[in-house]
């Protein structure tokens, strides 16, 4: 058991480091090698299901703590909850597969990989969504080697990484034949490089975009800073802009006062920003904003949105579709007792945003179609690619 724990610990350290440090993402190609070795060579004498459960839970907790400890810097209690919750979600598929293997006396390493892929797929497709630790995402800093994800999605990347882990194990401990390992590693990369250099063309008519980050601490400072002061900070940052600017992009929930949708065009802040910029003819402001819409006396909807303003009026709105569990929306609200639900939402300060967007893109005066996403949505590969393909088919030529 001690040796097994050592190998599971090593895998957890490698996995956590691959996610926590961009420069160490290459470790993802060997993260499961210690676990494969342990399960193939050490676990034969200790197939006790409780031992396996302990090893899997320990692996999940340690890897999540290393990969996600940054969340503790914002709010320690919420960060701790996030680490524990994701560890349990990671542990459950591993435990279920191991339990079935134990009951049916079938011990194969591919069962562990099947459980991992189940964890990733579930993380993308239910209300407790937290697709942060998808193996394929570790290489996102280097899009030129993973451009082929456009056909397989990030899950395809995870399958590729798992395959390489298995081939590395075989090379180190079964035979020294490197051809399969090298082919599996470099063939997708070569395909990706071909796609990267042949699909992207330099634009002869580029757009000039200014992205504003006021550098305001988002959880506490922003909440207690009047919106007028935040707008003034943005105006100071915009003073250096010239008349070649096409688009100004402001952060998520930059205007966070739950402004009524019906009065959007009378908000003075857009006009202030518009007047401060010597703009081009096709000028647009894309700003994060918190919106509220009353349907009746007892029915009010809140939205985390992007509004597109041409300097004179709001021309389109996109409402965020994918939400951080408990922070932005309580998952499966109907299953909770009302008293417990109130306590949970008070603790997390849950916003409970709605999502009813009719489109995901904005159109400028010169016909540019700009597809937009908000923060957390970028983690959802299937949703992201679906929207990109839809807007691309409608002529979208820019993603923000």
Image (cartoon, helix red, strand yellow):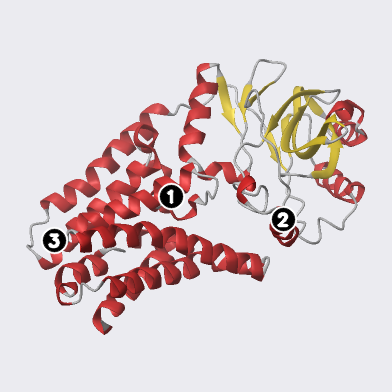
Whether label 1 touches label 3, CB < 8 Å: no
Please tell me which of labels 2 and 3 falls first in the chain.
3
Residue density around tag 2, few if under 14, some if 14–19, many if 20 or more, within 10 Å: some
Q: CA distance from mark 1 to mark 3?
A: 25 Å
Left or right: 271, with 212 as reference point = right
Left or right: 133, with 353 as reference point = left
At a point 27% along the width and 70% down the height, the residue shown is: 49
Report the residue marked by disc 2. Answer: 345
Identify the disc placed on residue 170: 3
Front disc: 2 or 3:
2
Report the residue marked by disc 1. Answer: 137
**Depth check, front residue: 122 or 197:** 122
Farthest residue toward the bottom?
2
SS of the residue at dot 2? helix
- Image quarter in which the C terminus is found: top right
At a point 31% along the width and 73% down the height, the residue shown is: 50
Please tell me which of labels 1 and 2 falls first in the chain.
1
Residue 291 lies, in percent from the top left, at: 80, 37
**Depth check, front residue: 248 or 389:** 389
**Eyeballing the image, is 3 above or below 105?**
below
Work out whether residue 320 can be spotted: yes
Please tell me which of labels 1 and 3 falls first in the chain.
1
């Amino acid at each position: 058991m001690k040796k097994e724990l050592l190998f599971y610990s090593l895998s957890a350290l490698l996995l956590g480091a691959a996610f926590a440090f961009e420069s160490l993402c290459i470790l993802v190609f060997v993260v499961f090698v210690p676990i494969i070795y342990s399960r193939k060579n050490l676990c034969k004498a200790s197939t006790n299901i409780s031992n396996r459960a302990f090893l899997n839970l320990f692996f999940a907790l340690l890897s999540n703590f290393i990969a996600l400890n940054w969340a503790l810097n914002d709010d320690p209690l919420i960060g701790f909850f996030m680490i524990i919750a994701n560890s349990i979600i990671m542990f459950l598929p591993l435990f279920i597969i191991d339990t079935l293997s134990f009951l049916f006396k079938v011990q194969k390493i591919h069962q562990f990989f099947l459980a991992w892929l189940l964890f990733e797929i579930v993380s993308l497709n239910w209300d407790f969504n937290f697709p942060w630790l998808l193996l394929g995402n570790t290489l996102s800093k280097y899009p030129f080697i993973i451009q082929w994800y456009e056909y397989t999605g990030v899950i395809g990347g995870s399958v590729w990484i798992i395959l390489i882990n298995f081939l590395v194990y075989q090379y180190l401990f079964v035979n020294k034949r490197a051809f399969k390992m090298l082919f599996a590693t470099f063939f997708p990369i070569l395909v990706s490089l071909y796609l990267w250099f042949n699909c992207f063309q330099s634009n002869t008519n580029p757009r000039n975009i200014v992205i504003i980050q006021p550098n305001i601490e988002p959880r506490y400072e922003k909440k207690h800073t009047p919106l007028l002061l935040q707008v003034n900070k943005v105006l100071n940052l915009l003073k250096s802009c010239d008349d070649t600017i096409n688009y100004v992009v402001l952060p998520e929930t930059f205007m966070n006062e739950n402004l009524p949708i019906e009065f959007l065009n009378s908000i003075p802040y857009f006009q202030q920003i518009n007047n401060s910029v010597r703009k081009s003819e096709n000028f647009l402001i894309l700003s994060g904003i918190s919106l509220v819409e009353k349907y009746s006396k007892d029915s009010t909807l809140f939205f985390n949105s992007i509004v597109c303003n041409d300097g004179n009026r709001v021309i389109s709105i996109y409402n965020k579709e994918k939400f951080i569990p408990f922070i932005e929306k309580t998952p499966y609200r109907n299953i909770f007792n009302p008293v417990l639900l109130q306590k949970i939402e008070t603790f997390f300060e849950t916003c409970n945003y709605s999502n009813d967007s009719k489109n995901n893109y904005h159109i400028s005066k010169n016909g540019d179609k700009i597809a937009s996403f908000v923060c957390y949505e970028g983690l959802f590969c299937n949703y992201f690619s679906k929207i990109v393909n839809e807007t691309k088919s409608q002529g979208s030529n820019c993603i923000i």
